[in-house]
Amino acid sequence: MTDVMVRAEGVVKKFGTNTVLRDISLEVKRGEVMCLIGPSGSGKSTFLRCINHLESVSGGRLFVEDDLIGYRQKGDKIYELSPKEAAEQRRDIGMVFQKFNLFPHMTALENVIEAPIRVKKVSKAAATARGKELLERVGLGDKFDSYPAHLSGGQQQRVAIARALAMEPKLMLFDEPTSALDPELVGEVLDVMKELAKSGMTMIVVTHEMGFAREVADSLVFMDGGVVVEAGDPRTVLANPQHERTQAFLSKVL
Amino acid sequence: MTNAQHGSAAGETLPPNGAVPTKAIKAIKLRHPWRTFFAIVIILIAALFIYDAGFNRPAYDWASVGKYVFDVRVIGAAFNTLQLTVYSMIIGIILGIILAVMRLSPNPIFKSVAWVYLWTFRGTPVYVQLVFWGLLAVIYQSIDIGLPFMHPWISFKTTAALNAFTLAVIGLALNEAAYMAEIVRAGILSVDKGQEEASKALGMSWGQTMNRITIPQAMRIIIPPTGNDVISMLKTTSLVTAVPYAFDLYTRTRDIASETFNPIPLLIVASIWYLFFTSILMIGQYYLEKRYARGTGMQIERRGKRKFVREVAPRD
Ligand SMILES: Nc1ncnc2c1ncn2[C@@H]1O[C@H](COP(=O)(O)OP(=O)(O)OP(=O)(O)O)[C@@H](O)[C@H]1O
Ligand SMILES: [Mg+2]
C-alpha cells in the first residue's frame, strides 16, 4: 500500500471554453490534513468535486490511493467509467458541503443510515447501531429523531459529517463546512473536525478558518485563478507568505 | 429595567433579574361585526333558494331524484365511472413518471420521444382522441405480434381484444400521461440540486437517488396538482361516450332520462354521485399531503380532524 492518499498530476478542468483548473499537481499523504484556501472563483470547490468525480477532469490524472478517478486505464487507452463504477469509487470518499445538503424528509438517524443500508447493504439493525454511535460522537446523542428543519446549522453540519462517516470513508472532503454558519456555531463543527483529524482521518478542507488551518493542517495550499500559487507548512505560509498574491489574499482575510 | 416589562408577553417567564413576574395579557378579542352581518345575509339567501327549490319548482322533481339515486343501473354506472377514473389515473401516473424521467434524462433520443408524445397528446382534444380510439378497429383490423414483414406469431382481431371500456381507459390514460409528465417534471426540478449531489457523494446510484431522495421530496409538489387531475378525470370520464362507451355515470343517466323524458332529476342524480366521489378523493388527498410533509414541520397533529375541516373547506 502506498503512503499517498490523493495525487493530482497536472489536473485541468474546463467548463466549455472556461478553464477553471490549470495544471494542478499536489499530493496528500495518508492521515494528513490539507487546507485549501483562495479567493472566490479560484476553483477550490471544482477541485474537490473532481476528487470524488462529481465533475470529471478534462486533463491530467487524479488518483485516490491507486485508483484513477473517473477513468480506467488499459495499456495506453483510457476508458470512461460507467455510472455504476463511478458510484463505487465515490462510496469511500466522504464529502461535506457548505449548505449541509441533509435529506429534509428523513430524521438525523435516517440520514446517517440511508447510504450504508442502500449502498453497502448493511443490515438495518447494524446500520442503526453504528449510526447512533456516530451521532453520539458528534455530540448529537439526543437528536436521533429530529428532522433537519428542527436542528441548528451547526447541528445539521455535524449530522452531515456523521452521515459521511457512516460509509467508513478513507478520505473526507470538506467544502467550506462552516461558511454558512452563524459565528457562534462555527466552533462546534471545527471541534468535530479536529477530533476527526486526530483520529487519523485523511482530510482535504476548503476553508477560510485560518486558525483551524494553523492548528490542525499538515499542509496549506493557496489557489488562485485555477493554479496552486503557494503550498507548504501552514504556519510558515501564514506567517511568511512568499508570493505577492498570497500576501494580498492573506492581508484581506487575516 | 423597563426592558423587562416590555420583554415577554408570555406571562410565565420570570424577568432576568428576578423582579416581579410580568402578567399575562388579558386582551378583549377583536370583533368582526361585518363578518357576522354577511354570514347572516348569505345564510338567508341560501335558505330562500333551498325553500324555493324544494317547494316552488316542480321541474326538479325531487321524488324522482330520490327514486333514481340508488337505482341499480345508476349505482352500476357510478361504479364504472369510478373504475374508469382509477384505472386511467394509475396508468396515466406511471406513464407520466416515465415520460418525465425521459424528458430529464441526458439521452437525446429519450428526450425527443417524450417531447413528441407530449406535443401530440396535449395538442389535441381528449374528445377527438377518444373518437380515434373508438375507430381503432377500423384502422387496424387485427393486432399482430411478431417481426415486421413476417407471418405474425400471434394475431387477434382488434374488436375481440379491446372492448369499449378498455379503449376508453387507454384513451383517457394516454392523454392524462402527457399532463402528469409535466406535473412530475416540475416536481423533480423543484428539488434542490444539492440533494442529488449529496446522494451521489454517498455512492448512491441514479436510481436510488431518484427513489429515495428526489421523488419523495418532489411528491410534495406533485400531489396537489395530481389530486386536481384525479378530480378532473372523474368528470372527463363523461366524454367516453365518444368511444362510444355507454355505461359511465353521465351517459347512463342521460339514457335513462331519454326514456322517462325527465332529464333534470337525473342530472341531479349524476351530480350527487360525482360530488360524493370528489369529496372522498379530497379526503384522500389531504392525508397524502400530510404523509409527504415529513420534515417540513407540517405533519399531522393530534387535532388533525379539526384542521381537516378547516383546510378542505373553502377558505375565507
Ligand atoms: N458547473 C459549472 N459550469 C460552468 N462553470 C462553472 C461550474 N462550476 C463552477 N464554474 C466556474 O468555475 C469557477 C470556479 O468555481 P469554484 O466554485 O470552483 O470556485 P471556488 O474557489 O470554490 O469559489 P468560492 O470560494 O466562491 O466557493 C467559477 O468561475 C465558476 O463560475
Ligand atoms: Mg466553492
Image: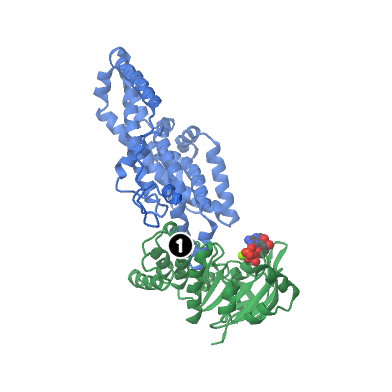
Chain colours: A green, B blue
Residue that numbered label 1 is attached to: B208
Q: Is residue B121 above or below residue A166?
A: above
Task: Describe residue B272's horizontal placement relative to residue A93 as left or right.
Answer: left
Q: Is residue B285 above or below residue A67?
A: above
- Percent x, y of residue A9: 67, 78
Residue at (34% x, 48% y) in the render: B300
Res B258 seen here: no
Of residues B8 and B203, the one nearer the viewer is B8
Q: Quadrant of the C terminus of chain B?
A: top left
Please state the quadrant of the image where ligand 2 appears: bottom right
Residue at (49% x, 68% y) in the render: B202
For disc 1, the neighbor class at 10 Å (few under 14, some 14 to 19, many from 20) is some
Q: Quadrant of residue B19?
A: bottom left
Res B78 seen here: yes
Q: How many marks?
A: 1
Q: Which type of secondary structure does the marked residue at label 1 adopt?
A: helix
Task: Describe residue A237's horizontal placement relative to residue B124 as left or right.
Answer: right
Task: Describe residue A219's horizontal placement relative to residue A134 as left or right.
Answer: right
- Percent x, y of residue A225: 71, 68
- Percent x, y of residue A101: 50, 61
Residue at (27% x, 29% y) in the render: B73
- Percent x, y of residue B227: 41, 41
- What's the residue type where badge 1 is placed? Gln
Residue at (51% x, 33% y) in the render: B125
Of residues A14 and B257, the one nearer the viewer is A14
Of residues B74 and A182, the one nearer the viewer is A182
- Which residue is most to the right? A244
Q: Quadrant of residue A60?
A: bottom right
Of residues B238 and A205, the one nearer the viewer is A205
Subunit of mark 1?
A: B
Q: Quadrant of residue A226?
A: bottom right
